[in-house]
């Protein structure tokens, strides 16, 4: 009854209840275009298992977090943006996290300044 995945927008994308532009998928992760891109490449990579974010992650989620990053690296390779790209995990509302299903942003295809805002 209290399954957070019922209302989670990214679980709904995984279930096909909401549309998305799929970029990549394997047994563990799913990647799709961000609906409001902040760079020429802005892809979200999510674990197929729901958990709210890095703060809430458990030991058992370590592999999923790593696999999201490896998938981002693979997408960056495919898109030939390896000169410079960024993977970002926003953690908590103060950092801009607005969807509480862990996701790795893959940003690239333009110069990325440092430090980020
Ligand atoms: P956050 O701010 O939580 O780190 O990142 C959430 C990201 O998800 C934002 O960049 C936002 O544009 C994106 N987003 C939110 N809802 C949807 C959606 O329904 N579909 C897609 N493709 N992206 C979404
Ligand atoms: Zn979810």
Image: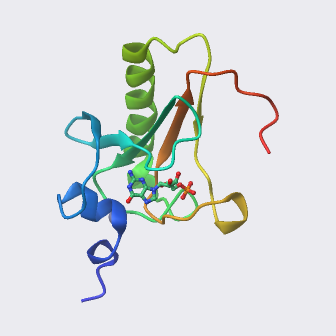
Q: Residue at x 32, y 76 (%)?
A: 7
Residue 34 sits in which quadrant? top left
Above or below, comparing residue 72 to residue 38 in the picture: above
Could you say which is closer to the camera, residue 74 or residue 60? 74
Q: Residue at x 82, y 35 (%)?
A: 115
Is 114 positioned to the left or the right of 90 in the image? right
Could you say which is closer to the camera, residue 17 or residue 62? 17
Is 91 positioned to the left or the right of 3 in the image? right
Q: Position of residue 107 (x, y in %)?
A: 56, 32
Q: Residue at x 80, y 45 (%)?
A: 117
Residue 9 sits in which quadrant? bottom left
Above or below, comparing residue 7 to residue 11 in the picture: below
Q: Position of residue 25 (x, y in %)?
A: 24, 36
Residue 51 sits in which quadrant? bottom left
Is 53 positioned to the left or the right of 22 in the image? right
Q: Position of residue 26 (x, y in %)?
A: 22, 35
Q: Residue at x 52, y 28 (%)?
A: 40
């Amino acid at each position: 009854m209290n399954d957070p995945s019922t209302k989670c927008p990214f679980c709904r994308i995984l279930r096909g209840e909401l549309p998305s532009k799929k970029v990549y998928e394997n047994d563990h992760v799913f990647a799709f275009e961000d609906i409001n891109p902040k760079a020429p490449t802005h892809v979200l990579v999510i674990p197929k298992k729901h958990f709210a974010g890095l703060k809430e992650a458990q030991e058992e989620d370590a592999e999923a977090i790593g696999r999201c990053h490896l998938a981002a690296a693979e997408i960056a390779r495919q898109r030939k943006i390896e000169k410079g790209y960024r993977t970002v995990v926003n953690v908590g509302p103060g950092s801009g996290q607005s969807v509480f299903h862990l996701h790795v942003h893959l940003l690239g295809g333009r110069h990325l300044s440092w430090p980020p805002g």
